[in-house]
Image (cartoon, rainbow, N blue to C red):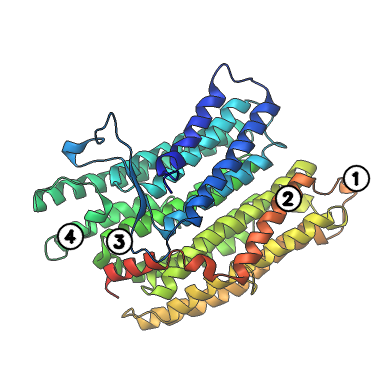
């Protein structure tokens, strides 16, 4: 396993981005596109090798690696290092990242017509930033990658979106920057207070578990809230969610796939790694609040999804609503809920990325994403219709498809929760179940309106999916079906992580 290095996994995309931007690399769209797809494919295979050689029984981190500078740690005298490691949860998220990037690049051919060097280099830089977030063991290293992510997102939205995309990109960047300042402030005061108490300078995430006997409650709550603000904007949760439907409705179609697959997962990961693992007692204190917050997300964004005029905004609000189930699972404070929440995060990334692949194909042919302007496309795009039906059934939570098991686990975990507010627990479980059934309404409305209503005259001449689009959607559907039938193949990989988190929470 010596050939498996986290340094290479994270920084190979950076090398690819630099190679593409070099003046000697031909500025020819076909060559750039082919190089990007081949590199992304090989990088995905390399990520899969980590999965192949991962020991699921290991309790803790594996594949640990430190990036040294001329043999020295990054900032050793300050207790800050460039250390990376994987556990079961971060391994799955890393493989997911490589997979989403590969799909995005395959779907970019139809929509990206200008500035190919900049586009493909920014996609690879975004991939490296997301992988760094998932693999960083040091909280300041985590923050470097967390901030780095803003740069490629801004460019790929602003440069290749519609006429209003630049404003949406600025809105995302500014809102994220403000939230990140709360996050950074929390890290700084945690770092210095930890030094004042222990006389040891360290930013290692695993060394920062807050002992309530040493760290006063007011301090823990203050830092916890700072971290929470930093992460809920990225997840996103109401009322910090407006940037997501806005940026998705204005970004280019392949960029929609990338954002749906990666951004929310980074926020959920941060919430688990910092708020749950570092502040277990405060997380238990805030669990009822997070449960109500999750319900608000499900109900409010689900209702907003129904009234949208554009397909992109409808799917975006549906995606935000689905993250409410993640919050329910985490707030349940038991293994069933936690496993469901992590599984739900991965499922949302796959299913909603697949929905945006469908939207990408439809938009390329019709040049519109307005629901009233679409209709009856199933008559001229039967392959797309049948594959989309599988994806829509998965989003609803039909048995034997990917999102059924995590939704069921989240609801079961909520019902089994030992929170003191048992009335809240029961209400949450009932509302979650009703919302799960109600979500079928707007998802099936999307499917009916786009594919099953009366075929409009102007769409009679459009063609079905190309072989490349068919391959991408088929691959996504196979993933959705396989992990729907065999959910334990995913759950067993991060089972040890849930044990560690619950041990820390002492529940």
Q: Quadrant of residue 107?
A: top right
Name above or below for residue 493 compared with residue 384. Answer: below
Give the answer, above or below, for where 330 lies relative to 255.
Answer: below
Disc 1 to disc 2, C-alpha distance: 23 Å
**Residue that carries the numbered disc 1 in the rendered image:** 461
Q: Earlier in the sequence, mark 4 or mark 3?
A: 4
Q: Which residue is mark 3?
A: 277
Label disc, if present, on residue 171 of the rendered structure: none
Looking at the image, do the residues carrying marks 1 and 4 touch, with CB atoms under 8 Å apart? no
Label 4 sits on a secondary structure element that is helix
Of the pair 57 and 156, the residue shown nearer to us: 57
Q: Of residues 108 and 422, which is closer to you in this image?
A: 108
Residue 224, how many percent across, how many down? 27, 57
Q: Is residue 45 left or right of residue 417?
A: right
Report x, y in % for residue 164: 60, 35
Q: Is residue 458 left or right of residue 260?
A: right
Residue named by callout 4: 218
Tag in front: 4 or 3:
3
Alpha carbon of mark 1 to alpha carbon of mark 4: how far? 65 Å
Q: Which residue is mark 2?
A: 471
- Residues at circles 1 and 2 in contact by the CB criterion of under 8 Å: no
Give the mark, 1 or 4, whose residue is nearer the N terminus: 4
């Amino acid at each position: 396993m010596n050939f498996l290095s986290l340094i290479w996994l994270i920084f190979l995309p950076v090398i690819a981005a630099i190679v593409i931007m070099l003046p000697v690399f031909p500025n020819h769209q076909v060559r750039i596109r082919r190089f990007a797809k081949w590199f992304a494919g090989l990088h995905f295979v390399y990520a899969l090798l980590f999965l192949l050689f991962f020991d699921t029984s290991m309790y803790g981190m594996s594949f640990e690696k430190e990036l040294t500078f001329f043999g020295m740690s990054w900032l050793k005298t300050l207790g800050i290092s460039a250390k990376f490691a994987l556990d079961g949860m971060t391994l799955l998220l890393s493989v997911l990242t490589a997979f989403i990037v590969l799909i995005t690049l395959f779907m970019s051919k139809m929509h990206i017509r200008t500035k190919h060097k900049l586009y493909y280099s920014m996609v690879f830089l975004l991939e490296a930033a997301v992988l760094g977030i998932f693999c960083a063991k040091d909280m300041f290293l985590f923050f470097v990658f967390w901030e780095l992510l803003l740069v490629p997102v801004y460019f790929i939205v602003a440069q290749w979106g519609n006429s209003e995309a630049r404003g949406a990109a600025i809105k995302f960047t500014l809102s994220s920057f403000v939230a990140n300042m709360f996050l950074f402030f929390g890290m700084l005061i945690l770092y210095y207070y930890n030094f004042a108490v222990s006389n040891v300078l360290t930013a290692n995430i695993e060394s920062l578990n807050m002992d309530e006997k040493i760290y006063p409650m007011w301090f823990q709550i203050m830092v916890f809230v700072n971290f929470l603000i930093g992460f809920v904007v990225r997840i996103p949760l109401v009322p910090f969610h407006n940037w997501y439907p806005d940026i998705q409705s204005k970004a280019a179609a392949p960029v929609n796939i990338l954002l749906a697959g990666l951004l929310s997962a980074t926020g959920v990961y941060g919430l688990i790694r910092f708020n749950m693992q570092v502040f277990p007692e405060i997380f238990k204190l805030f669990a009822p609040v997070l449960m109500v917050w999750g319900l608000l997300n499900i109900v409010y964004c689900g209702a907003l999804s129904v009234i949208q005029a554009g397909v992109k905004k409808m799917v975006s609000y549906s995606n935000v609503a689905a993250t409410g189930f993640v919050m329910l699972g985490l707030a349940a404070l038991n293994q069933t809920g936690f496993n469901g929440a992590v599984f739900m995060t991965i499922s949302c990334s796959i299913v909603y990325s697949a929905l945006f692949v469908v939207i990408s194909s439809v938009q390329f042919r019709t040049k519109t994403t307005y629901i009233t302007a679409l209709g009856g496309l199933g008559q001229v795009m039967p392959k797309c219709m049948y594959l989309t039906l599988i994806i829509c059934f998965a989003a609803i939570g039909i048995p034997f498809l990917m999102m059924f098991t995590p939704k069921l686990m989240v609801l079961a975990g909520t019902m089994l929760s030992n929170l003191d507010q048992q009335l809240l627990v029961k209400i949450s479980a009932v509302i979650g179940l009703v919302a799960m059934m109600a979500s079928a309404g707007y998802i099936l409305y999307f499917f009916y309106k786009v594919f099953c209503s009366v075929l409009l005259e102007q769409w009679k001449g459009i063609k079905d999916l190309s072989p490349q689009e068919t391959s991408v959607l088929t691959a996504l559907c196979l993933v959705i079906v396989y992990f729907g039938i065999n959910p334990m193949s995913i759950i067993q990989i991060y089972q040890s992580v849930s044990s560690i988190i619950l041990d820390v929470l002492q529940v």
